[in-house]
Every structure is written in structure tokens, then in C-alpha cells.
Image (cartoon, grey):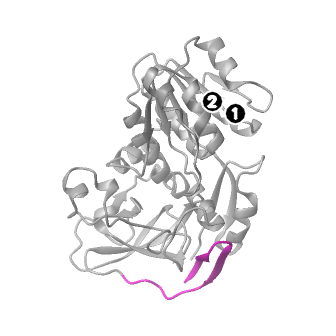
């Protein structure tokens, strides 16, 4: 099969690999569509650690091509997506209900072969059926949407809240829609790229801010004098992460959702955090949220058709890293025809 293999920072090669075979309790999936994630870009830049060489990619959908021994409930030809994080079910985190923080987690595209390939094998426990009403491309948003759902769960948004989202890439747009459906009265998005601000307004944002020409803090306080109840940082930008503390109201919540380089540090004033009782949260992975993401997409509660800006065949995969984050890009989608 053809696959995009990460060998190290700046070194991804589209090459031939042997087709994987499903083991006991696994299915072989013929991959049809795979989204490009900020984690993929971070892996390419060397900002995120990986067990290389590894097939990159983890936001995907496809159809079952082969069934391994001991698998019930699925048949060849079934249309599916997956939770890409394989866990041990045995460590203290798994046994305490924090499976997404598993000590031995093995994530597609990072620790185990991922989905920018023609095929992948996955444990059936990670596989979710998708309805005929969802295209493979739409279903490829299940993984990032599940992450957004988990982040919004953590934030504890209440009816009538004012929520600020810093960064309106694919994740920021998904978070905005989840926030809207959680009952927020004002959904404010700060984003320097015009295309992304436009999509945020289409997807439920009530207000947008261009931080290139506007002061986000000043603009926010025109809307809510005391600041936002919840602030999401969805860009993985250390400067933006540091600024979020001053954008939250007293007693407010800051969710650092975007993935920063692992060696990047910011300064936080603990007196300010204590005096204003600011709650700072990290949001990692997608705890028990994949099935909910499938439902949200299937029932058209979350829109993704306007988020894909470019589609590339697997043979052109290397182009994604020069395109990622550009002013005319939003979600990049790799199409795979085996």
C-alpha cells in the first residue's frame, strides 16, 4: 500500500509499505479520507514527540476491508471511523475512568501507524459505525469534534455564558459550534485570518475580532465589561495562551486547548490567578466522546462542509506542510483511493 511515513522532523516520505493484517479483535479499514491536524504539523516540525518511523495521520473514515478473529458486530463493507487512541484498560488511570490519560496509550500517527495510508488495522473496541448520511469526508471530523466535545465538557459552560475562542482554525470552528449548542449567549472568536472569521460567523459565532488590527481585550469588554466566563485558546500559540488569563472574568475559566511545542514556556502570575480565582485547564484527547461526535455530525448539529479548504490526493501529501496555516487555508483533507 501507499503511505505517508514520518521518519523525523522535516522528513515525511510517501512510499510503499506492506498491507497491514488485522490481528485477533481487530479490523482492517480501507481508508477513504483523512484530515490534517495541527498535531501532524507539530510532528513534522519536531515540536511533538513520536515513535518514528510511523505512518502519520489520525482523523479519518473508511470502510472495513477484512475482519480479524474474535470480532463481532461488524461486517466487511461497513462504513466506520475510529477513536485513534488505543489504551491498556489496566493502568490506574484507565481503571479510574480517565482512559484518555492512559499510561500506556498508543496513538495513531504518533506511536502506531496512522491513517495517511490506504489501509490501517485497529482494535474493534476503537471502531464506530457511521450512517449512510455522512460522507467519508464529514466523518473524518469525528476525532477532532470528539476532542472539542471533551474540551467543552471540561469548561462547564452554562446557559447564558459569554465564551471567547482564540483561534478559528478547524478546531476553533468546531469548539464554537459546541459552545453555541451548550447554551452560551455570546460566542466571540478572535482570529487574524479573514476566511476563518467568516466561517466562524457562519458556524454560530455572535462576534468576531481581528487581533491584527483590534485589541482583543478592549473589544471583548465592549461586549462584556468584566470579561469572558470561559476562554479557549485553540491555536497553540504561547503568547495567546498567556494573554488568556487577562481575558477571563474573575472566577472564570481558561482552557488551553491548542497544542504548544513541548519545550515552550510562558510566565503566569500566581498572585493574579489566586486573587481572581482563575481556573486553568488543559484539554487532552477525547474522553468517551467519539460516539457523541458521530451523533452530532449525523444529526447536522455541527457543520463541517464549509471547513474544508483544500483536498489533496495521498500522492501529494507532502504539500500539506507548506500549505498548513496559510491565509487561504482552513481544513486540509487527504483523499485516498486504493
- Residue placed under numbered mark 1 in the picture: 197
Quick one: SS at disc 1?
helix
Magenta stretch encompasses residue 91: no
Range drawn in magenta: 1-21
Residue ID at (68%, 48%): 330
Q: In this view, does 292 lie to the left or right of 322?
A: left
Residue 289 image offset from top left, x and y in percent: 36, 47
Q: In this view, does 15 lie to the left or right of 151?
A: right
Residue 36 image offset from top left, x and y in percent: 60, 59
Quick one: SS at disc 2?
strand
Quadrant of the rendered image containing residue 82? bottom left
Placement of 82 over or under 329, stated as above or below: below
Magenta stretch encompasses residue 16: yes
Q: How crowded is mark 1: few (under 14 residues within 10 Å), some or many (20 or more)?
A: many
- Residue placed under numbered mark 2 in the picture: 189
Q: Residues within 10 Å of mark 2 (few under 14, many from 20)?
A: many
**Residue 305 visible from this viewpoint:** no
In the rendered structure, which disc, 2 or 1, sits on the residue that comes first in sequence? 2
Quadrant of the rendered image containing residue 56? bottom right
Amino acid at each position: 500500500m501507499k503511505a505517508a511515513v514520518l521518519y523525523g522532523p522535516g522528513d515525511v516520505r510517501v512510499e510503499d509499505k506492506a498491507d497491514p493484517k488485522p490481528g485477533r479483535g481487530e479490523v482492517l479499514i480501507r481508508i477513504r479520507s483523512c484530515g490534517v491536524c495541527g498535531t501532524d504539523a507539530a510532528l513534522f516540525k519536531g515540536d511533538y514527540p513520536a515513535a518514528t518511523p510511523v505512518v502519520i495521520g489520525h482523523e479519518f473514515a473508511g470502510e472495513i476491508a477484512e475482519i480479524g478473529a474474535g470480532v463481532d458486530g461488524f461486517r466487511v463493507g461497513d462504513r466506520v471511523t475510529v477513536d485513534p487512541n488505543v489504551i491498556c484498560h489496566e493502568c490506574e488511570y484507565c481503571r479510574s475512568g480517565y482512559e484518555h490519560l492512559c499510561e500506556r496509550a498508543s496513538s495513531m500517527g504518533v506511536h502506531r501507524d496512522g491513517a495517511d495510508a490506504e489501509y490501517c488495522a485497529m482494535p474493534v473496541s476503537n471502531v464506530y459505525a457511521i450512517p449512510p448520511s455522512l460522507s467519508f469526508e464529514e466523518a473524518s471530523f469525528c476525532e477532532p469534534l470528539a476532542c472539542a466535545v471533551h474540551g467543552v465538557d471540561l469548561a462547564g459552560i452554562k446557559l447564558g455564558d459569554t465564551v471567547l475562542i482564540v483561534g478559528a482554525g478547524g478546531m476553533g470552528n468546531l469548539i464554537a459550534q459546541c459552545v453555541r449548542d451548550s447554551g452560551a449567549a455570546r460566542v466571540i472568536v478572535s482570529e487574524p485570518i479573514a476566511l476563518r472569521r467568516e466561517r466562524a460567523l457562519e458556524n454560530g459565532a455572535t462576534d468576531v475580532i481581528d487581533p491584527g488590527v483590534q485589541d482583543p481585550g478592549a473589544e471583548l469588554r465592549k461586549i462584556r465589561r468584566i470579561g469572558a466566563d470561559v476562554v479557549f485558546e485553540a491555536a497553540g500559540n504561547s503568547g495567546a495562551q498567556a494573554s488568556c488569563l487577562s481575558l477571563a472574568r474573575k472566577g472564570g475559566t481558561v482552557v488551553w486547548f491548542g497544542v504548544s511545542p513541548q519545550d515552550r514556556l510562558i510566565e503566569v502570575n500566581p498572585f493574579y490567578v489566586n486573587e481572581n480565582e482563575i481556573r486553568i485547564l488543559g484539554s487532552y484527547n477525547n474522553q468517551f466522546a467519539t460516539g457523541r461526535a458521530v451523533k452530532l455530525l449525523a444529526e447536522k448539529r455541527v457543520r463541517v462542509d464549509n471547513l474544508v479548504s483544500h483536498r489533496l490526493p495521498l500522492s501529494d501529501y507532502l504539500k500539506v506542510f507548506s500549505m498548513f496555516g496559510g491565509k487561504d487555508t482552513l481544513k486540509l483533507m487527504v483523499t485516498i483511493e486504493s
